Image (cartoon, rainbow, N blue to C red):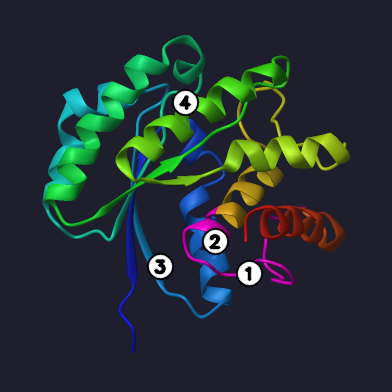
Amino acid sequence: MPKAIRILFIGNSFTQRNNLPALLEELAAARKIEVAHDLISVGGASLRTHWNGGRATEAIASGRYDFVVLQEQSTLPVKNAVRMAENVRLFDAAIRQAGARTVLYETWARKHSPDHQRLITAAYRSIGEELGALVVPVGEAWETFLATHDHPALHDRDQSHPSPAGSYLAACVFLTVLLKANPVRIDSGPAGLGEQDRRALQEVAWKRFS
């Protein structure tokens, strides 16, 4: 039996909200892919906060992981892409030394600032290309979906964090890009998300990024 793909997620509430790693595990299981994850999350934290805290680097150094997913503080790519790139470089060196691969979780623009997606995308794509890291373009999937759908809402009421549908779309993009598996027609999903909405989210992820 193939061993589980082990993934370490490092981020903040954009990863923790609605338990994105567990959503990915559930989708993967539906495609007969076993995923085991750990999550290191601190509310509002930047990657530099995690680096200075030491817990994330200790986990990476254990060598237990195939992939390490980095999620930067949501507005830093807009405010200071140079600083973000510095943070990612620090982690990438440690991740490579531990024998894992760096994965960048590209997040989305806040609801009232959709124009910021261009800057977020550019920041993640630029450092990803420089390092040969895998970029999981969740923000671009949100942008694509929001251009043609007004339901289900991807943003939570605060217009920043993901709704259950937003996290589900993120998980579908991770399944497509990281695990190379098709989310379309998988029946499972967050409570309250109907079949039609699930299908719309699945198809955006697969058709846009497969």
Q: What amino acid is at disc 4?
A: Ala
- Residue that label 1 marks: 182
Q: Is residue 1 left or right of residue 16?
A: left
Is residue 181 in the magenta section? yes
- Choose top left, top right, bottom left or bottom right for residue 176: bottom right
Q: At 51% from the left edge and 48% from the top edge, which residue is drawn?
A: 19
Closest to the observer, 127 or 193: 127
Residue 35 is marked as: 3
Q: What amino acid is at disc 3?
A: Val
Residue 163 visible, this orientation: yes
- Residue that label 2 marks: 175
Rounded to the nearest whole Å, what is the CA distance between mark 4 and mark 2? 22 Å
Q: Nearer the viewer, mark 4 or mark 2?
A: 4
Is label 3 in a helix, a strand or a loop? strand
Rounded to the nearest whole Å, what is the CA distance between mark 2 and mark 3? 11 Å
Q: Position of residue 65 (x, y in %)?
A: 24, 58
- Residue that label 4 marks: 123
